[in-house]
Amino acid sequence: MIKLLFLAGSARKESLNKKLALYASKMAEEHEAVDVQFLDLADFDLPIYNGDFEDEHGLPDNAIRLKKLFMDCDGFFLACPEYNSSFTPLLKNSMDWISRPNKKDDNDGSAFQGKICALGSASPGPLGGIRGLFPVRMWLSTIGVNIIPAQVCVNNGMDAFKGDDLVDGQKQKMLGDVINQFIETTKKLNA
């Protein structure tokens, strides 16, 4: 059994990337021996990272909770909105907090080292947020995350989704291929 997290780098209620991560989690649930958890970063409100705050207060409770979820998983699917050809401040801040050591926990380790990651993005525009995935790949690889080669970018996202469902057949297939590679890679590396 492998444990996988699915999340988006957006807290917006109607975020296209949140819809993509949720839909991807439903696809993954169809596989055998996979424990799937969708999480919403809106449920993990965190202050902007500040070393002085950390020195005085330690890790916030939400950072500890989020870090534990990452430490306990084998991999994560990340749907990243593109903000000015990069990733969101919410995502960066959340990941910065959970990269920090929890000095109150002797069993604290890395939230990222050796984890498997699959990437996706969704956008109302014609490029599907692809420009934002390049810096995400670089950033995650420097903190020890193994990112699978396949990725999915859902362009014209306002038409690709109906409610929370991805209805564009071509994008469904692309996402299915990414999920299959993600699960297969994670199972092999955790065998």
Image (cartoon, rainbow, N blue to C red):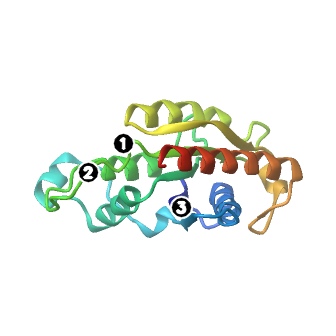
- Residue indicated by mark 3: 11
Q: Residue at x 71, y 43 (%)?
A: 152
Q: Amino acid at mark 1?
A: Gln
Q: Nearer the viewer, residue 180 or 79?
A: 180
Q: Is mark 1 in CB contact (under 8 Å) with mark 2?
A: yes
Left or right side of 90 for 184: right
Circle 3 Cα neighbour tier, 10 Å, few/some/many (<14 / 14–19 / ≥20): some
Disc 2 designates what residue? 109
Secondary structure at numbered mark 3: loop
Count neighbours of disc 2 (C-alpha within 10 A) and say few if under 14, some if 14 to 19, many if 20 or more: some
Query: Is residue 123 something one can see in this rendering?
Result: yes
Q: Which amino acid, by three-letter code, is at mark 2?
A: Gly
Question: As drawn, is 129 to the left or to the right of 46?
Answer: right
- Of badges 2 and 3, the one in the foreground is 2
Q: Nearer the viewer, residue 146 or 84?
A: 146
Amino acid beneath label 3: Ala
Report crowding for label 1: few under 14, some 14 to 19, many 20 or more residues within 10 A (C-alpha): some
Instruction: Tell me the tag on residue 113.
Output: 1
Residue 125 percent across, percent down from the top left: 76, 42
Question: Outermost residue toward the right?
Answer: 169
Q: Which residue lies at the image location 49% right of the left edge and 43% below the top edge?
A: 189
Distance of mark 2 from mark 3, alpha carbons?
26 Å
Q: CA distance from mark 1 to mark 2?
A: 9 Å
